[in-house]
Image: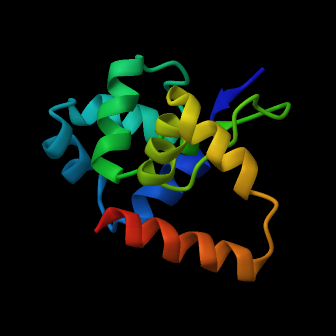
C-alpha cells in the first residue's frame, strides 16, 4: 500500500527552508496538525490539507508518497512537469506529436525545436 512519507515531506520542507510554524501560517492549517503530519503521527491527512502543503512547498502530492509498487503515472519533480504532461494527455494532437518525437536523436530534436519556435512567431 502507498503511504505518506514523513521523510519526503521533511525533504520538501527543507528544500524551501521552511519551518512547521511558517507552513502553518502560509496554509492556514493549525500548527498542531502540521506537527503531526510532518512527524508521521498523522498518516492520513485530508487531500485538501496535502494540496495546501504541496502548493506551499511548490511540489506535487506525489512528492510525499512512498510507493510500494510502481505508480501507473510517473512521479514528477515539479508542478510544471506535471502540468505539461497533463496538457499532453488531454490534447490528442499534442499526444501524437510527443509520441512521434520522443525517439528522435538530438540533432532531429534540435531541428524540431527550431521549427516549433519559428511557428510561434
Say whether residue 66 is left or right of residue 40. Answer: right
In the visual, does 66 lie left or right of 63? right
Q: Is residue 107 above or below residue 73?
A: below
Q: Residue furthest right?
A: 69
Q: Residue at x 56, y 45 (%)?
A: 63
Depth order, front residue of 6/68? 68
Residue 90 lies, with reference to residue 119, above or below; the image says: above
| In the image, farthest residue toward the bottom | 107
Location of the C terminus (image quadrant)? bottom left
Query: Residue 36: which quarter of the image?
Result: top left
Residue 7, image x, y percentages? 60, 50
**Residue 119 position within the rendered picture, expressed as x and y whole percent measured from the top left:** 39, 64
Colour convention of the picture: rainbow
> In the image, is residue 44 above or below residue 35?
above
**Residue shown at 39% from the left, 72% from the top:** 118
Residue 24 showing in the rendered view: yes
Left or right of 97: which side holds 79?
Answer: left
Residue positioned 42% across, 53% down in the render: 80
Decide which of 3, 81 is in the foreground and name it. Answer: 81
The correct choice, above or below, for 48 with respect to 65 in the image is above
- The number of numbered badges drawn on the structure is 0
- The quadrant of the picture occupied by the N terminus is top right
Q: Is residue 61 visible?
A: no
Query: Which of the 4 quarters of the picture holds residue 40?
Result: top right
The x and y percentages for residue 9 are 50, 47
Task: Name the residue located 60 percent from the left edge and 69 percent from the top edge.
Answer: 112
Spot occupied by residue 88 in the image (x, y as percentages of width and height):
54, 39
Amino acid at each position: 500500500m502507498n503511504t505518506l512519507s514523513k521523510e519526503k515531506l521533511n525533504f520538501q520542507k527543507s528544500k524551501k527552508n521552511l519551518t512547521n510554524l511558517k507552513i502553518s501560517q502560509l496554509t492556514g492549517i493549525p500548527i498542531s496538525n502540521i506537527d503531526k503530519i510532518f512527524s508521521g503521527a498523522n498518516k492520513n491527512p485530508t487531500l485538501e490539507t496535502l494540496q495546501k502543503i504541496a502548493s506551499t512547498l511548490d511540489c506535487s502530492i506525489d512528492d510525499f508518497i512512498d510507493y510500494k509498487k510502481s505508480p501507473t503515472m510517473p512521479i514528477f519533480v515539479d508542478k510544471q512537469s506535471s502540468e505539461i504532461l497533463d496538457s499532453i494527455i488531454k490534447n490528442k494532437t499534442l499526444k501524437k506529436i510527443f509520441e512521434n518525437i520522443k525517439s528522435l536523436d538530438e540533432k532531429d530534436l534540435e531541428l524540431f525545436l527550431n521549427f516549433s519556435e519559428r511557428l510561434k512567431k
